[in-house]
Image (cartoon, helix red, strand yellow):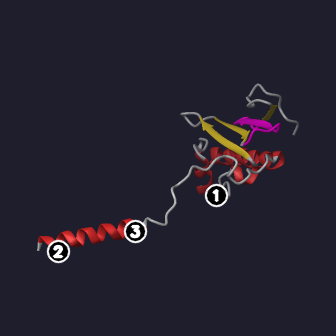
């Protein structure tokens, strides 16, 4: 009986190893192998910033606080989806205050480029900066 168990164990091990024979080793993908990132689209980013400001203003009127995440704005049907790098070539970082009475939104190019970075907060004023991350002290954009 022990011989049968040993034979079955070796047979199972052999099958497992032979199944891996055709597999290649996993390799790490380098940045040159990745699909090219979408170049920053400033107009698309600015449109989304305006939508977020409007959504946050509505959320504040209804809930007496700003949303803590994009997901919360989507769930409240104030945004259709979370802003993504694939849509605009920009990264969107929503930073609400702990008490949710203010918020900040930093929008930066996803890839190194001469495109502007943007900043807005609960005032609704959009600021822009070239070559560095925009802040509340950056020049305000004309409406």
Residue 135: x %, y % from top left: 73, 29
Disc 2/disc 1 C-alpha distance (Å) = 64 Å
Residue bounds of the magenta highlight? 111-125
Which quadrant does the N terminus fall into? bottom left
Residue 138 lies, with reference to residue 114, above or below; the image says above
Residue at the disc numbered 3: 18
Mark 3 or mark 1, earlier in chain: 3
Q: Nearer the viewer, residue 68 or 18?
A: 18
Q: Residue at x 58, y 33 (%)?
A: 97
Furthest-left residue in this view: 1
Q: Residue at x 65, y 45 (%)?
A: 61
Q: Secondary structure at mark 2?
A: helix
The circle on residue 4 is 2
Residue 120: x %, y % from top left: 73, 36
Q: Secondary structure at mark 1?
A: loop
Q: Nearer the viewer, residue 33 or 124?
A: 33
Residue 123 figure quarter: top right
Disc 2/disc 3 C-alpha distance (Å) = 21 Å
The circle on residue 77 is 1
Looking at the rendered image, the disc whose residue lies closer to the viewer, 3 or 1, is: 3
Furthest-top residue in this view: 137
Q: Residue at x 57, y 37 (%)?
A: 100
Queried whether the magenta region covers residue 132, the answer comes back as no
Considering the whole magenta stretch, tell me its main secondary structure. loop
Mark 2 or mark 3, earlier in chain: 2
Queried whether the magenta region covers residue 120, the answer comes back as yes
Furthest-right residue in this view: 142
């Amino acid at each position: 009986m022990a011989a049968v168990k040993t034979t079955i164990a070796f047979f199972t091990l052999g099958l497992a190893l032979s199944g891996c024979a055709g597999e290649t080793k996993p390799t790490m993908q380098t940045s040159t192998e990745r699909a090219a990132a979408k170049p920053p689209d400033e107009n698309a980013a600015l449109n989304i910033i305006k939508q977020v400001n409007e959504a946050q203003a509505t959320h504040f009127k209804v809930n007496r606080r700003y949303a803590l995440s994009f997901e919360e704005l989507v769930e409240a049907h104030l945004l259709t989806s979370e802003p993504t790098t694939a849509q605009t070539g920009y990264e969107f970082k929503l930073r609400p205050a702990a008490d949710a009475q203010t918020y900040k939104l930093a929008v930066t190019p996803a890839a190194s480029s001469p495109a502007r970075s943007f900043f807005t907060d609960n005032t609704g004023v959009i600021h822009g900066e070239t070559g560095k991350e925009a802040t509340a002290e950056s020049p305000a954009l004309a409406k």
